[in-house]
Image: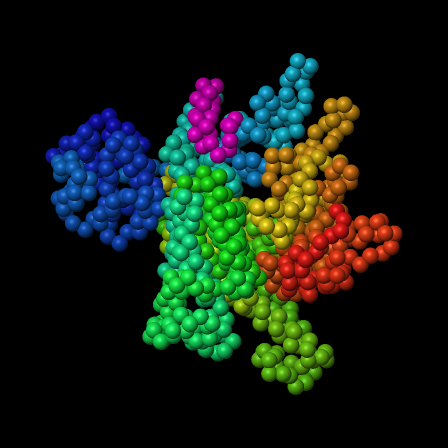
Amino acid sequence: MSTKMHELKRHFGTVCVTSEGRKGLPDKEHKGCVALSYHPGNWGAFREASDELGKQGLKVVAVVPKGTDTAPLRVYDYNLQILENGGSRKSIRKKAAEIAGCSEKNVAFATCSMKETRVQIEDQCVVVCCRGNVALDMTGTCEHLGITRVIAVVDGADLPKGVEPKYEEGRIISFVKKTDAGESEVATAPWLKGFSGDLIRVSNYMNVEEIAAGIKKVIADKSKSDPSWAPLKPRNFLLTPGYGLWSENPVAIRYLQEQGFTVVSPNVGAFGKIGNKFDLRQLSKELGVPVLPSSDCELTFSGGKADGKKIKETASKLVLTAEFRQLAERAGQDEKAALISRVRESGHKEIRAMEKELRDLNFRRALDHLVSKTIEKNVMLVTDAEMEKFPIRVKGSAEVGGGRSHYTVRSWAELENALEEAYSTMSSLGIAKPKVMLELNLASARHIEINMVAHRDEDGRLVIARSPWFRDCSMQNANQKMFERTVHPDDYERDIALLEMKTLGMSKLPLKADVPEHLREFTATRDEKEIAKLGARIELYKRETQMLEKIRADSERIIAHTGTTGVFTMEFLVDEHQQHYILEANLRLQVEREISERASMIDGKTVNFAEIFFHVAAAASAGVSPDLPDLRKADSNGLVAWEVRICKLLVDPSSKWKNPALVSPLINSITELKLPQPKPWLHLNMQQIDKHFDPETGAGKFSINPSADSMFGIMIVTAETKEKAFERMREVLGEMEIKGPGGADVSTVPFYRKLFDLPEFREGLVDGIGPGIDFLPKFISYQMCLERSARAAKAAEEASSRKNTSPLDAAGLGPGISFTEFSTNVFDKAQQIKPTGK
């Protein structure tokens, strides 16, 4: 047996036999091929052996028993050739030779057996390739798991050249810059204070080549001084990108995996199946998962310009589909009849002349024909007024996350501007071939998402957790989530039971026909309207429960079909009829995962998604089953958890996207910091706020890390009911103050206080199912209008020494108007306001 075969046998338990009976590998110089046997239970060992053989220049063909689930192999290697072991060795040899393009005598047979059965997570080394709050979460998870080997990656913006960490008892206590005059403290990277591991400096967190080189250097240095590092293989290094950065970049992830490292991420194969928004949409349609009307293909650019004809056709079809559907519902007819009515009543002779030929086509073909012909004739079929009524959403390429290059357009001019902006944004991010898709916009929809967890068991079968991790993330501004809360079918079942109990013991009175059947046997000492309200809420909650169960079932169907493993999120939009539509998949950890962790349990223990992710990634890399409790037992712990993101600024949603107006100034220095008192139900993470000392006075002072994004903290409250959660959030917001120079507010805390003082907001959250994604932008605009009105009135009073009617009152938007009245036409009227003072 050759030396290489000895190595394979030692590492993988592999034995190869050629057709001539000689033991050894085929000669790679003659295009050798290895027919490697695969059986359920040794999929990890198979993959590792396959990788090693591939490095030696050999083609690998998987030989599997008939009926074997080959998904574990497919998701890691799209190009893997698979043969069913249904014939003689001679026939398999012949087929393998044909695939590899080599002679039959250069085909070897191999089997592999697995030696490891479990991964000892505490023996791994975690490389934290992120910053801020999530980096602190990852190091905290390592400490909880007993992982002592931890490396932190830090870039030049967070740790500038010349700035060095200062240690005390092996832990970083501050950062200092040495000068001729001595040391001076530098306020930077507050999340690294208390860290005791190794640091890798890189020019940028996105530079995975520098990260890989830095890890290899640490391995070489540590192996010389610490014998415990010597046995570690590259796959024992778990690289976690957190969220953002390269966490959803399959090219970066594949590069690091090719270096032998384990990336704490869903398997790379998933990125090509559900990571791409358009591919996920196509797959969802095949599986029967509801999707929003959108473009049938991704739209490309040529020379920075989109295909004008294709854009017009796609946008027109989306608007008309929505319009005909609405007309059909109102008239009690089908969409085809609505289309024919529109053609017959058209003011264009060319369009009216098409009625006869359209009657012989089904709705979809008739719509395609109508749009195509009108564009050819240069007839404007869809007006700006119709686009205002049925807005369109422009979405950038799959590689763009965080809501960037997403625009809602309400006119043809806005559509053209949005396409230019999307192309510019994607090009600036280094995307070689920018693409967009157009989608019908659901203005008042709710954003519901569900965390999913899946892994492979010891036989390679996919195990999917029965997820209790639902979240409502509808409170957004400029595509950024600001307030999130957990929701669960059990919560609504509990509300239904309480509401039904309220109807018991009532004296009999005749009830209207629209009262639900199960309430008819009860009557009211209250008025009939109160009974109807209770019944309506019960039916609303029942539909909501059914909708959440459908979201879970559809998510499981997609995961089972693609074989995705790891921790990730499936996101949906839900319309006013409680119909859900797939939006996208986030193949990474998310900021808001913490509220799901605090409102769930597995076998009575608290859930930690980062901990689960470490186990799943390490086990998948070794080809074994993770050492986890049965994830199918995951359930709600009976609590609800709410979270607000503490941010530095807000964007005015009524302004154009190119020049967003800032509600709060971008100030990093803090002159007054008052945080809520510790409470058992409160979790506050403000690790982007750095505490340091004034070199002149020696007094402690605070600042917001200047290189941080707009979010520099999160605040979470938990409670047994929605009512308690609401009151607790109001309480802690009232205790919080973050002021900058001159007493200016430098955070979104005052805005949240106003939001939680709004009766309509409380009613929607506590007594309903929550407002839609259009609620927060309208409320922000409303607050801005009030502020403009106050400034204008003050300026006028100072100028003339008499009280003047404010422009807001003149526009019909004075302080006396309710938010509900205001929200119907906020954008139109907000544009009419012209304050006389600043």
Q: Give the answer, above or below, for where 830 lies relative to 744.
A: below
* Farthest front residue in view: 349
Q: Is residue 529 magenta?
A: no
- Residue 210 seen in the figure: yes
Q: Is residue 205 magenta?
A: yes
Q: Position of residue 374 (x, y in %)?
A: 40, 65
Percent position of residue 804, x then y: 82, 57
Tell me which residue sits at (40%, 49%) in the image: 300
Which residue extends farthest top?
A: 180
Badge count: 0
Per the rendered image, the range of residues in magenta is 201-225
- Frontmost residue, 251 versus 90: 251
Task: Determine the residue positioned at 52% across, 55% down.
Answer: 413
* In this picture, residue 39 sits left or right of residue 684: left
| Viewer-proximal residue among 53 and 42 | 53
Dividing the picture into quarters, in which one does residue 177 lie? Answer: top right
Mark yes or no: residue 9 visible: no
**Where residue 58 sits: x, y (%)?**
23, 34
Q: Quadrant of residue 6?
A: top left
The outermost residue toward the right is 801
Drawn side of residue 764 relative to residue 97, left or right:
right
Q: Looking at the picture, does residue 389 appear above or below residue 30?
A: below
Task: Please state the horizontal and vertical placement of residue 536, each as a whole percent of the image.
Answer: 61, 73
